[in-house]
Amino acid sequence: MPEEGLFNTVIVANNLNPSIFSQLWLVKNGVFAETEFDQSKPLIFTPMAVNVATRELELMVLPQMLQATFVQKNVDYERLLKKTLGTIANLLPHTPYQAVGFNLIWNLRPKDPVEYKKIDRAIFLSKDNPLHKSFGEDNCRFGGYFSKDVSMGRLRLNIAPVTLPFSKETTPIEGLQLTFNFNHDLTEQNRAGEIFNFLGYWSSAHKMAQEMVADVGKGWSE
């Protein structure tokens, strides 16, 4: 089964003011309940950076971005995103937000590590590829970049060969890492509204990415 990696959502902005985001402000405006903060992790509030965590996600605020990273998987992603990033965008509608995007990472671990290099070559380097003759050695590894327009914006997919950490194996193992970015550039009219609407696409983006991961890993990955 594909291994889920980092899932996060980023709002790119110009001159965001982290000093606004005090713990009191976050609680008072319903971004987090007072009881939600994960006391096992430090709460960081400075004029240049804010970082707070709950059991479900971690919120980072920098002058150039807001970022929500999921700590737990299989939660109600859209509800959490709208409650945190969506609420913040609506509270600060005049902030010069530039773009909003989802980032999702999956790892594919081969069933047969010995056969992995053949599979990697078969997926990414056909005999019609002009680089085929230059990468014939047994130690070559391959990946790729793919992009297209989708309903929510622009999808960019990077696939790279990686060394995966321990799992059932006693040593690290080679595999593929698929990194998806769904990006939407914001217009001038109603940026906060656009952000809130985009956050509602999380399930669609997750499903689209998950299907591609399954297609790439079909037959050879765990």
Image (tube, rainbow, N blue to C red):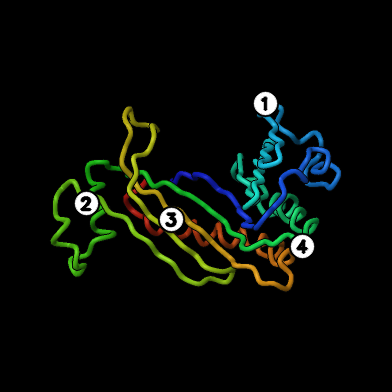
Q: Earlier in the sequence, mark 3 or mark 4?
A: 4
The type of residue carrying mark 1 is: Ser
Image position of 51 (left or right of 36): left
Tell me if label 4 and label 1 are in contact, CB under 8 Å: no
Q: How many marks?
A: 4
Other-residue count near label 4 (Cα within 10 Å), few / some / many at <14 / 14–19 / ≥20: few
Residue 194 in the image: x percent, y percent? 69, 67
Upstream in sequence: badge 1 or badge 3: 1
User: Is the C terminus in the top left, top right, bottom left or bottom right quadrant?
Assistant: top left
Q: Which residue is mark 2?
A: 118
Mark 3 vs 2, N-terminal side: 2
**Circle nearer the viewer, 1 or 2:** 1
Q: Neighbour class for label 1 at 10 Å: few (<14), some, many (≥20)?
A: few
The structure residue drawn at horizontal position 65% and vertical position 64%, both measured from the top left corner, is: 198
Distance from Cα at disc 4 to Cα at disc 2: 53 Å
In the image, what residue type sits under mark 2? Answer: Lys
CA gap between label 1 and label 3 equals 34 Å
Mark 4 is on which residue type? His
Specify the quadrant of the image occupied by residue 100: bottom right
- State yes or no: discs 3 and 4 in contact (Cβ < 8 Å): no
Q: Where does label 4 land, which residue? A: 94
Q: Earlier in the sequence, mark 1 or mark 2?
A: 1
Q: Earlier in the sequence, mark 4 or mark 2?
A: 4
Give the image location of residue 179, x and y in percent: 45, 53
- What secondary structure is marked by label 1? loop
Give the label, 4 or 2, closer to the camera: 4
Judging by the rendered image, the residue that carries numbered circle 3 is: 213
Q: Is residue 68 left or right of residue 190?
A: left
Residue at horizontal 35%, vertical 51%? 160
Q: Position of residue 1 (x, y in %)?
A: 43, 46
**What residue does disc 1 label?**
40
